[in-house]
């Protein structure tokens, strides 16, 4: 059974810092890994999608890496801003015999960027 | 571009009352559709997914059911709500295929009182 763990559960940093969020998964048989952002009381916004054959993806100040063999992914946020405050979730799409390959989510890291 | 609509945004219902949450997707055809529940302090739990009209798969036994009457419409229902049904419900879609990206709606906060 695929399990996804995110550490730390919460993180507070001053504005301008670079930071790294961690995601680990137990089964390396995945199609891809997706990072999401969730604001309080809102839905999930897709940030980055990394396919299993890729090592990293970048979007603006965000960079996500994937090491499938070790079951790890990191989300790097450069020059953090108060507007980055949110919960960040990672999810892996596992190999499945079914036609709808489900996502397995971590519990998230709650990020607070202090002005 | 594709968009996903989910309503209502919030709902307060008494125990024993029925439930109907609706989700529609625009700008795509034949999507995979999903219902997730997010309980406080916990990760997202997949409840149902659908690969086509009338095709529903349930991931966990529960008091809820799902239906897909049209290609881009997904409905979550209950005949009689329980207190334990309270939570944040999210609808999502993805294209067919393995290497696809998932997109989520804005969620419905359900409180059963």
Image (cartoon, rainbow, N blue to C red):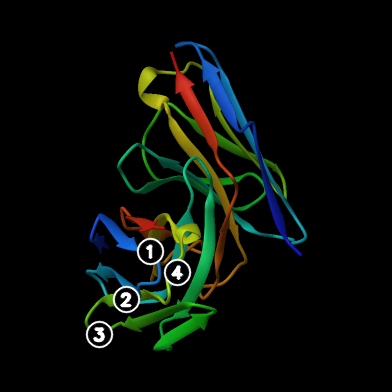
The residue pinned by badge 4 equals A34
In which quadrant will I find the C terminus of chain B? top left
Q: CA distance from mark 3 to mark 4?
A: 17 Å
Q: Earlier in the sequence, mark 3 or mark 1?
A: 3
Q: Chain of mark 2?
A: A
Q: Position of residue A62 (x, y in %)?
A: 46, 76
Q: Chain of mark 4?
A: A
Q: Are marks 2 and 1 in contact (CB under 8 Å)?
A: yes
Q: CA distance from mark 2 to mark 1?
A: 9 Å
Q: Earlier in the sequence, mark 4 or mark 1?
A: 4
Q: Chain of mark 1?
A: A
Q: Which residue corresponds to the image point at 38% horizontal and 64% vertical from the top-left? A: A90
Near-viewer residue (B28 or A77): A77
Q: Which residue corresponds to the image point at 35% horizontal and 24% vertical from the top-left? A: B84
Evaluate whether label 2 is on the same chain as label 3. Answer: yes
The residue pinned by badge 3 equals A69
Q: Which residue corresponds to the image point at 34% horizontal and 63% vertical from the top-left? A: A14
Q: Would residue A113 be visible to someone looking at this image?
A: yes
Evaluate whether label 2 is on the same chain as label 1. Answer: yes
Q: Of the numbered discs in the image, which one, if any, rests on residue A73?
A: 2
Q: Residues within 10 Å of mark 1 (few under 14, many from 20)?
A: many
* Helix, strand or loop under label 4: strand
Q: Would residue A1 be visible to someone looking at this image?
A: no
Which of labels 3 and 4 is toward the front?
4
Q: Position of residue B105 (x, y in %)?
A: 60, 48
* Helix, strand or loop under label 2: strand
Q: Chain of mark 3?
A: A
Q: Which residue corresponds to the image point at 23% horizontal and 60% vertical from the top-left? A: A8
């Amino acid at each position: 059974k695929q399990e996804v763990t995110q550490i730390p559960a919460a993180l507070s940093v001053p504005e301008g810092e670079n930071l790294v969020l961690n995601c680990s998964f137990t089964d390396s048989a995945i199609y891809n890994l997706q990072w999401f952002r969730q604001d309080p009381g809102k839905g999930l916004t897709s940030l980055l999608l990394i396919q299993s054959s890729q090592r990293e993806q970048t979007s603006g100040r965000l960079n996500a890496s994937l090491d499938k063999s070790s079951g790890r992914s990191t989300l790097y946020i450069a020059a953090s801003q108060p507007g980055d405050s949110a919960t960040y979730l990672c999810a892996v799409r596992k190999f499945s015999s079914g036609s709808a390959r489900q996502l397995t989510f971590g519990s998230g890291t709650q990020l607070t960027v202090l002005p | 571009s594709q968009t996903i609509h989910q309503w209502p945004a919030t709902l307060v219902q008494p125990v024993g009352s029925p439930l109907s949450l609706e989700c529609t997707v625009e700008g795509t055809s034949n999507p995979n559709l999903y219902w997730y529940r997010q309980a406080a302090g916990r990760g997202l739990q997949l409840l149902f997914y659908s690969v086509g009209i009338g095709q529903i798969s349930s991931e966990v036994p529960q008091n809820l059911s799902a239906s897909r009457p049209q290609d881009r419409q997904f409905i979550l229902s209950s005949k009689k709500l329980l207190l334990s049904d309270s939570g944040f419900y999210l609808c999502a879609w993805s294209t067919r295929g393995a290497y696809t990206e998932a997109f989520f709606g804005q969620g419905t906060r359900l409180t059963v009182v």
